[in-house]
Image: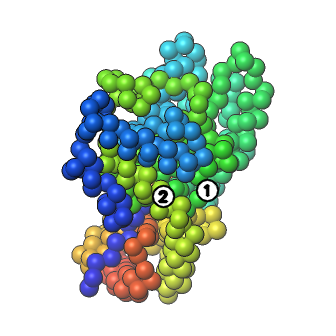
């Protein structure tokens, strides 16, 4: 059987058009963008052009786009950078996030808590959507940062970022110039392919994106930082990226990121329709299974993610047996797949452990098609039946 890749939320294949755009900067145009000779200036021109294109995609200014090595670094720069600024001003501050964030956010918040920063976590409903009323109650006079993902990586639940930004604006209007500011950061890594990304529309102050989730290579990401946001660098060395991110520019990656976003801007509607059609077919075929539950509902999810729990069939076993059939899925976030604990996302959604342990994530992408659904379902059915017979 031909292999099937249903793990696009973990990483995507590099689009051939993206590869073609970046290849010259791996070979012929190999200069360091920080060098003043013609090799370096050619590389710098490519970086400038890419930054302009990316800024245009997000409705931002070019100086508000900071290139990083990926989502983890972008999230750390956003959170630690803001915290470090206010700590350096001897301010006692408070920061808020949700209980279903990616480990790159949750672990950074945990580290901030160890450093003595006051931290609060907001819960979600049974569909994995943040409870706005709870968030509103947690905002304090010294809250300087709220970090909430745009779409969840495990269950695909879309978070009310625009609504949160209205809350932040309301809170900001109450504060005088002598008060602390308040910023909204969103990890938009899973959202870029499918949701509105204009930063003015969303009302965000900081936003994280990653290349390898949008058909660009691994090792490139960006952080949007609205002009005027108080932030300090977290790495030191050169003065690249407006002094906020030291290190030689990843020119091929930057060019690739811009090309990937250009393709999204042209093909997004068509791709969403295609993925919805595949997802609908998966949902229909799963109706023939017994003792299963969908985690989240399609109306409040990304079109490419489907998270399913099977009773009396352990998620890791399902994953491994499907892999033996040449089918790749996930049990949740790739970054936490080594953990034996039930998913923190499903736990926050109120799923009992016996259901959470039997969860798998199917995440579709540009290169999938409807013909892959039935072979996947056939293998999955055999595996679930086999595991249930073995279950104590």
Relative to residue 270, is residue 103 depicted above or below? above
Q: Nearer the viewer, residue 38 or 359?
A: 38
Relative to residue 168, is residue 126 depicted above or below? below
Question: What is the quadrant of the C terminus in the image?
Answer: bottom left
Residue occupied by mark 1 = 196
Q: Residue at x 53, y 65 (%)?
A: 266
Q: Residue at x 34, y 72 (%)?
A: 5
Residue 40 in which image quadrant: top left
The x, y position of residue 390, in whole percent, is: 31, 77
Q: Residues within 10 Å of mark 2 (few under 14, many from 20)?
A: some
The x, y position of residue 50, in whole percent, is: 43, 46
Instruction: Describe residue 385's horizontal placement relative to residue 308 as left or right.
Output: left
Residue occupied by mark 2 = 262
Relative to residue 280, is residue 332 depicted above or below? above
Disc 2 to disc 1: CB gap under 8 Å: no
Q: Nearer the viewer, residue 239 or 279?
A: 239
First in residue order: circle 2 vs circle 1: 1
Residue 287's label in the rendered image is none
The outermost residue toward the left is: 27
Residue 67 in view, yes or no: yes
């Amino acid at each position: 059987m031909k292999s099937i890749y249903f793990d696009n939320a973990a990483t995507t294949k590099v689009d051939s058009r993206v590869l073609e755009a970046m290849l010259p900067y791996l070979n012929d145009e190999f200069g360091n963008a920080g060098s003043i000779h013609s090799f370096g200036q050619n590389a710098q021109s490519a970086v400038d052009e890419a930054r302009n294109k990316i800024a245009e995609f997000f409705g931002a200014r070019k100086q508000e786009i900071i290139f990083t090595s990926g989502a983890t670094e972008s999230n750390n720069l956003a959170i630690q950078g803001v915290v470090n600024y206010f700590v350096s001003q001897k301010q006692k501050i408070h920061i808020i996030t949700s209980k279903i964030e990616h480990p790159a956010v949750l672990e950074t918040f945990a580290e901030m808590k160890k450093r003595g920063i006051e931290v609060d976590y907001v819960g979600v409903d049974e569909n994995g959507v943040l409870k706005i009323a709870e968030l509103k109650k947690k905002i304090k006079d010294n809250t300087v940062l709220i970090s909430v993902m745009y779409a969840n990586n495990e269950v695909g639940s879309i978070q009310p970022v625009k609504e949160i930004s209205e809350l932040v604006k309301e809170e900001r209007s109450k504060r005088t110039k002598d008060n602390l500011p308040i910023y909204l950061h969103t990890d938009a890594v899973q959202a870029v392919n499918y949701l509105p990304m204009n930063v003015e529309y969303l009302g965000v102050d900081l936003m994280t994106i990653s290349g390898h989730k949008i058909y660009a290579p691994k090792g490139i990401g960006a952080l949007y930082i609205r002009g005027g946001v108080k932030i300090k660098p977290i790495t030191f060395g050169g003065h690249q990226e407006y002094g906020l991110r030291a290190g030689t520019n990843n020119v091929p990656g930057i060019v690739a990121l811009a090309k990937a976003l250009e393709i999204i801007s042209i093909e997004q509607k068509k791709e969403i329709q295609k993925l919805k059609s595949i997802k609908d077919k998966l949902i229909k075929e799963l109706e023939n299974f017994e003792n299963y539950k969908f985690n989240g509902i399609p109306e409040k999810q990304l079109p490419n993610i489907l998270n399913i729990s099977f009773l009396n069939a352990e998620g890791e076993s399902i994953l491994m047996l499907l892999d033996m059939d040449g089918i790749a899925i996930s049990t949740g976030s790739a970054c936490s797949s080594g953990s034996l604990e039930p998913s923190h996302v499903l736990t926050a959604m109120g799923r009992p452990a016996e259901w959470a342990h039997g969860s798998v994530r199917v995440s579709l992408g540009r290169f999938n098609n409807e013909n892959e659904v039935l072979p996947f379902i056939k293998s999955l059915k055999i595996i679930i039946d086999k595991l249930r017979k073995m279950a104590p």
